[in-house]
């Protein structure tokens, strides 16, 4: 999450610098409006986009030595493990972000209430294109969606020009732009660039409205800007007619000659910017993948860090200060921390997602846990692993030659759903046989179904089994998505062969819906057969087979 926020901030900064340096002074106001809206949206989306074709790997000759770390024995966890309360599972950075967003949302709601109250105590007149709201004892002038608020004390000779100006805001839906950034301020309240974006878009709105409104009476508009300083409502998502800080800029823009059309080529700058950002985010993904290798150990590209298994003095976990064997105490405390803070994601349980997450983190020279990385069978399990490790307390740092050093440490965490071991899967297969009246288990049938090609076989049952296995091997295709997520395991599958020889009622149970879908696809392709017989009559028979998906 922190990485995403930093990347988004960096992209917004680049886009804003490009705007201020190359585009802000041009009179392509509508183009600039589009640029600000699009680039802000891109800054939120681009960090999530990873394009495979743009990913690059480091040439082998440039790679440094790979060090395999001594790691702690894996911790196996399941839904039955000790779980903590919801508040305890939230790390403090997310708690702060949440509280800030709630406060920002309350402030937003308060400003909306201000507008509603102002409208309720004003005179409302409905027109075809807008709603005029006359505010008593006021010289304010602003618009919000179709509502144009006009102070009752505004001079009548200036009212026409103000209405023409505010009507441009109404027709071009400028309030939507401001509301978009107001909502962004709720989510990203800590990001100063969001406020700058909103300020830039508000400027553009005034330039656009001035440009449209002064076409018929430019002199009068100038005189009004120079002679009056209207009171305004301090609400960030309304289009204020008079904003003292904007008056000078608006007069300058009104006097400025229209930019030449050729300067619209400046907007082409956006293309290399976006491409560069895509290359950055895609390469970053490859880097993460190369750092975490699947297997019994997690590998780390060697730097100045000292592996946990080689450091002179291991980091001291709180409570282990007086322990004789601080290394053993550290490992015991880590395991206890994981069990205490563990919460099996409900979505992962519902999807049957389980497996081993290899994780690695660094205990830096100040004893903080940083640079948490992981690789596992599913994003849900990886996020839960990261949440657990993020809650690790500050420790006394590891030391080498008496000096504090960074110490990488790795630990595999195994997520296991109860009832999915081989023994339980076998029980599930057996339970498939409880079909009720009219269905006969394959093992109890007098004459097994005849697989096409087994008509003349001496042992038709053995021929059936052999051909089903051959069919599975022939049509097997390991799902690409499962390979990418490292999902493997055994799928128990059951199906019926009815009295007409058709394959019906396919059911499955396995470690992932992805593998179950593939297993069902294979079985659904089985050919029509000669039905099984019991007491010389065709009957419905049930058959079960486990299919094991295993990554090399």
Image (cartoon, helix red, strand yellow):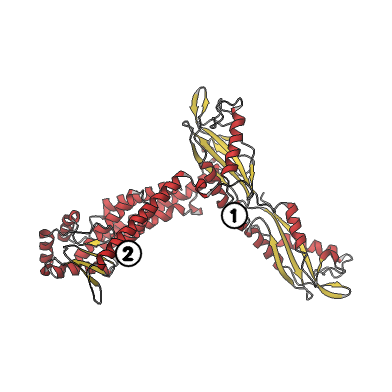
Few, some or many C-alpha atoms within 10 Å of disc 2 (few <14, some 14-19, many ≥20)? some
Q: Is residue 517 visible?
A: yes
| Closer to the camera in the image, 174 or 527 | 174
- 519 relative position to 4: left or right: right
Query: As drawn, which residue projects farthest toward the front?
Result: 121
Above or below, 78 against 517 in this view is above
Q: Which residue is mark 2?
A: 176
Above or below, 207 against 551 in this view is below
- 332 relative position to 140: left or right: right
x%, y% of residue 473? 73, 59
Q: Residue at x 22, y 66 (%)?
A: 149
Dot 1 lies on which element? helix
Q: Which residue is mark 1?
A: 348
x%, y% of residue 33? 29, 61
Q: Is residue 70 visible?
A: no
| Closer to the camera in the image, 129 or 97 | 97
Find the distance from the CA under tag 1 to the CA under tag 2: 38 Å
């Amino acid at each position: 999450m922190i990485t995403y926020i930093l990347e988004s901030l960096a992209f917004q900064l680049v886009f804003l610098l490009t705007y201020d340096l190359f585009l802000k002074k041009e009179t392509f106001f509508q183009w600039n409006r589009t640029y600000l809206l699009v680039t802000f949206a891109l800054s939120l989306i681009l960090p999530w986009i990873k394009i495979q074709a743009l990913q690059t790997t480091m040439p082998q000759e440039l790679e440094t030595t790979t060090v395999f770390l001594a790691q702690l024995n894996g911790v196996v966890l399941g839904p039955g493990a000790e779980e903590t309360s919801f508040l305890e599972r939230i790390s403090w950075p997310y708690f702060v972000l949440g509280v800030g967003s709630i406060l920002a949302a309350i402030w937003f709601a308060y400003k909306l209430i201000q507008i509603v109250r102002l409208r309720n105590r004003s005179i409302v007149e409905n027109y075809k294109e807008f709603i005029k709201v006359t505010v008593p004892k006021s010289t304010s002038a602003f618009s919000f969606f179709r509502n144009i608020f006009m102070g009752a004390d505004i001079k009548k000779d200036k009212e026409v020009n103000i209405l023409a100006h505010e009507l441009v805001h109404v027709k071009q839906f400028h309030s939507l732009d401001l509301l978009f950034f107001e909502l962004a301020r709720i989510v990203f309240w800590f990001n100063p660039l969001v406020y700058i974006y909103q300020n830039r878009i508000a400027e553009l709105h005034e330039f656009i409205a001035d440009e449209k409104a002064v076409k018929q009476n430019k002199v009068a508009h100038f005189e009004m800007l120079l002679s009056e300083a209207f009171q305004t409502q301090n609400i960030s998502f309304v289009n204020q007619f008079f904003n003292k800080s904007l008056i000078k800029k608006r007069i300058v823009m009104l006097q400025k000659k229209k930019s030449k059309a050729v300067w619209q080529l400046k907007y082409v700058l956006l293309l290399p910017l976006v491409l560069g950002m895509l290359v950055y985010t895609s390469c970053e993904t490859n880097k993460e993948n190369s750092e975490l290798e699947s297997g019994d150990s997690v590998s780390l590209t060697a730097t100045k860090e000292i592996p946990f298994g080689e450091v002179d003095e291991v980091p001291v976990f709180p409570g282990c200060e007086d322990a004789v064997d601080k290394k053993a105490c550290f490992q015991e405390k880590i395991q206890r921390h994981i069990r205490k803070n563990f919460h099996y994601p409900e979505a992962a349980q519902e999807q049957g997602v389980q497996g081993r997450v290899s994780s690695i983190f660094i205990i830096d020279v100040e004893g903080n846990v940083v640079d948490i990385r992981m690789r596992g069978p599913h994003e849900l399990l990886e996020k839960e692993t990261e949440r657990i490790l993020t809650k690790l307390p500050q420790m006394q740092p590891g030391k080498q030659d008496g000096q504090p050093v960074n110490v990488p440490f790795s630990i595999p965490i195994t997520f296991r759903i109860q009832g999915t071991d081989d023994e339980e899967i076998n029980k599930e297969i057996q339970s498939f046989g409880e079909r009720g009246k009219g269905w006969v288990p394959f093992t109890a049938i007098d004459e097994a179904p005849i697989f096409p090609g087994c008509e003349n076989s001496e042992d038709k049952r053995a021929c059936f089994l052999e051909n089903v296995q051959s069919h599975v091997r022939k049509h097997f295709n390991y799902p690409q998505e499962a390979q990418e997520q490292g999902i493997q395991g055994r799928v128990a599958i059951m199906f019926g062969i009815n009295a007409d020889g058709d394959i019906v009622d396919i059911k499955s149970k396995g470690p992932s819906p992805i593998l179950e879908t593939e297993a069902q696809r294979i079985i659904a392709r089985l050919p029509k057969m000669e039905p099984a017989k019991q007491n010389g009559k065709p009957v419905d028979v049930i058959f079960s087979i486990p299919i094991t998906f295993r990554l090399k």
